[in-house]
């Protein structure tokens, strides 16, 4: 019983050791249809309107993503 | 209790439980005495594709000086990689690493990921990404390594 509990605890300890997608596993994520933004041009227009009305910009998304390059 | 816990933890940390296979290694022994530039790439990665003309030029210019370029295709669909290679037709060596074992072993932090070894097989530098801005400096480092004779 103790052994079972010990092994279960050890399994739980290593449970979070392999989270995340490695850079070389991002082939599917890098496809165009996986982009969070389906229309970059429309988003650019919206950003411009937002900036002109609010006098601030940014905060819409985050840099990087995709293939993880640079 | 403690003994069991330690044993289980040791097994887990060695990858027996999580099922991690032994990472494959690049065989650099056949390139002894040469400067080796290893480049991890995939056809779905735009900077990887952008680096190919630069690597081709580098190979054409410096292969006689002792430069070996190993382009490791990792995490890619074989058909996509073949289509890209048919278009670019590189003269340097292409290695396939479908499961990413070599990439994991080199601890690639992004794509493309390049590693440079000197003539004695020592790891000199590693680099994430590719941009035409950094390329001349990288070439300068490679040329300085080629200038070193054993």
Image (spheres, rainbow, N blue to C red):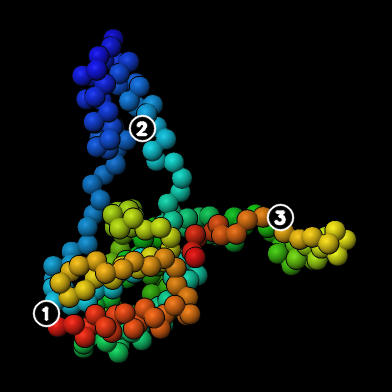
Crowding near the residue tagged with mark 2, few <14, some 14–19, many ≥20 C-alpha atoms within 10 Å? some
Which of marks 2 and 3 precedes in the sequence?
2
Q: Which residue is mark 3?
A: A60
As helix, strand or loop, the secondary structure at mark 1 comes to: loop
Residue B140 x %, y %: 34, 83
Disc 2 marks which residue?
Answer: A14
The answer to whether one can see residue A19 in this image is: yes
For disc 1, the marked residue is B150
SS for dot 3: loop
Say which quadrant the C terminus of chain B sits in: bottom left
Name the mark nearer the viewer: 1 or 2.
Answer: 1
Q: Distance between the Cα atoms at labels 1 and 2?
A: 45 Å
Q: Is residue B25 left or right of residue A22?
A: left
How many neighbours does mark 3 have within 10 angstroms: few (below 14), some (14-19), or many (20 or more)? few
- Which mark lies nearer to you, 1 or 3? 1
CA separation, marks 3 and 2?
A: 35 Å
Letter of the chain that mark 1 sits on in the rendering: B
**Quarter holding residue B141:** bottom left
């Amino acid at each position: 019983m103790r052994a079972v509990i010990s092994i279960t605890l050890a399994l739980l300890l290593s449970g979070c050791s392999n989270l995340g997608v490695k850079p070389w596993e991002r082939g599917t994520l890098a496809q165009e249809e996986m982009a969070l933004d389906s229309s970059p041009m429309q988003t650019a227009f919206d950003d411009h309107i937002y900036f002109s009305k609010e006098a601030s910009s940014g905060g819409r998304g985050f840099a990087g993503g995709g293939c993880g390059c640079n | 209790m403690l003994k069991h816990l330690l044993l289980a933890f040791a097994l887990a940390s060695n990858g027996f439980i999580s099922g991690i296979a032994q990472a494959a290694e690049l065989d650099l022994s056949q390139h002894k005495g040469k400067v080796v530039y290893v480049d991890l790439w995939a056809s779905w990665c735009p900077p990887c594709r952008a680096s190919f003309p630069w690597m081709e030029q580098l190979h054409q210019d410096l292969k006689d000086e002792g430069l070996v370029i190993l382009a490791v295709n990792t995490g890619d669909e074989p058909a996509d990689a073949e289509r890209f290679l048919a278009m670019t037709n590189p003269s340097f060596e292409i290695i396939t690493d479908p499961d990413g074992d070599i990439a994991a072993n080199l601890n690639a932090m992004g794509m493309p990921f390049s590693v440079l070894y000197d003539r004695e097989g020592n790891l000199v530098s590693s680099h994430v990404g590719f941009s035409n801005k950094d390329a001349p400096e990288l070439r300068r480092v490679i040329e300085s390594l080629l200038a070193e004779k054993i």
